[in-house]
Amino acid sequence: MIYLNGNFLPIEQAYVPVLDRGFIFGDGVYEVIPVYSRKAFRLEHHLARLQDSLNGIRLNNPHTNEEWCGLITQLIDYHVSEDQYIYLHITRGVAKRDHAFPNNTPPTIFMMSNALLTPPEELLQKGVSAITAKDNRWGRCDIKAISLLPNVLLRQLAIDAGATETILLREGFLTEGAASNIFVVKENKLFAPPKSHLMLPGITYDVVLELVETQCLPYSVRPIVEQELRSADEILLTSSTKEILPIISLDGKSIGEGKPGPFFYKLNQLYQHYKEQTMRGKQVSSF
Ligand SMILES: Cc1ncc(COP(=O)(O)O)c(C=O)c1O
């Protein structure tokens, strides 16, 4: 079952009019929320980021957090998998085609849940490869906008090259991946690019920084130049569905020893532990 504008229904029966501004302009925002053991992970943080995205495109939030929570709980209940990921999508609704905002138009609200398959152990042992590309996106990459054409094109460059992710560089600085945040490790210290309008504030990114802070692992949040990325001992990729992945080659050249490094193993262990701890006994409706 999916959720569309107040109803739960099979996806085959769900339709959106062609004049929806999501279809016409990509005028909307979205969230992706992982669900472990039927409990939404960091839900409050995802809903807070959703609110920031809605503020960024000047669209009212159609629901309170309690209402979102209730709808998400129902959606999770409908799905057979214990681990899922929720895709939540809001557009500026259906209106005659005109760039200007329509008046009194209800938003289109769509949610679906799919089985979450986290990266297999084998991939974590082996690591993945990445390429780099110029970050040619707009100046508000902090908004989780559904208009993802640049991200789609950039990510496809990686697929075409047989790699997993495209790491983006803007004016000589690391921003993020086409669909992930990127961290660098040098001499056993973690480096993270600071949040700005030029990257999405990842929920997983925040968890990683909380973990290194509470575990007193050395880290620094500061701009990272291209050369630091290329000469890193380790590069780590994070996202809600991929969790933490070690990048072992960049543009065909080995990173560090060309295999997942000690910082990755430590951090991933902490992350998996944190996941289990927070999910144990915590209900989705914990507001
Ligand atoms: C461009 C971009 N940056 C970062 C992320 C990671 O964000 P999160 O950890 O909240 O999934 C994503 C997630 O899909 C993304 O699309």
Image: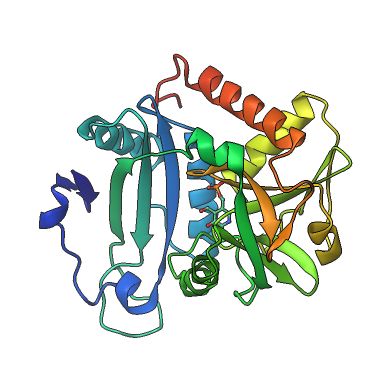
Please name the residue shown 28% across and 47% down the image.
112
Task: Give coordinates of residue 53: x percent, y percent.
Answer: 52, 57
The colouring scheme, among rainbow, by chain, secondary structure or one colour, is: rainbow
Would you place residue 60 above or below residue 57 in this image? above
Q: Residue at x 58, y 54 (%)?
A: 180
Q: Which residue: 38% across, 24% down?
A: 37
Q: Could you say where residue 281 lies in the image, as x and y percent from the top left?
A: 44, 14
- Residue 217 in the image, given as x and y percentages of width and height: 82, 30
Of residue 285 and residue 212, the one placed in the foreground of this image is 212
Residue 257 visible to the viewer:
yes
89 to 157, vertically: above or below: above
Q: Residue furthest left?
A: 13
Residue 239 in the figure: left or right of residue 183 = left
The N terminus, quarter of image:
top left
Name which residue lies at 76% across and 25% down.
214
In the shown orientation, is residue 76 left or right of residue 36? Answer: left
**Which residue reaches farthest right?**
187
Q: Position of residue 271 (x, y in %)?
A: 61, 29
Residue 103 appears in view: no
Toward the bottom, the furthest residue is 98
**228 relative position to 98: left or right:** right
Q: Is residue 187 above or below residue 199?
A: above
Q: How many marks?
A: 0
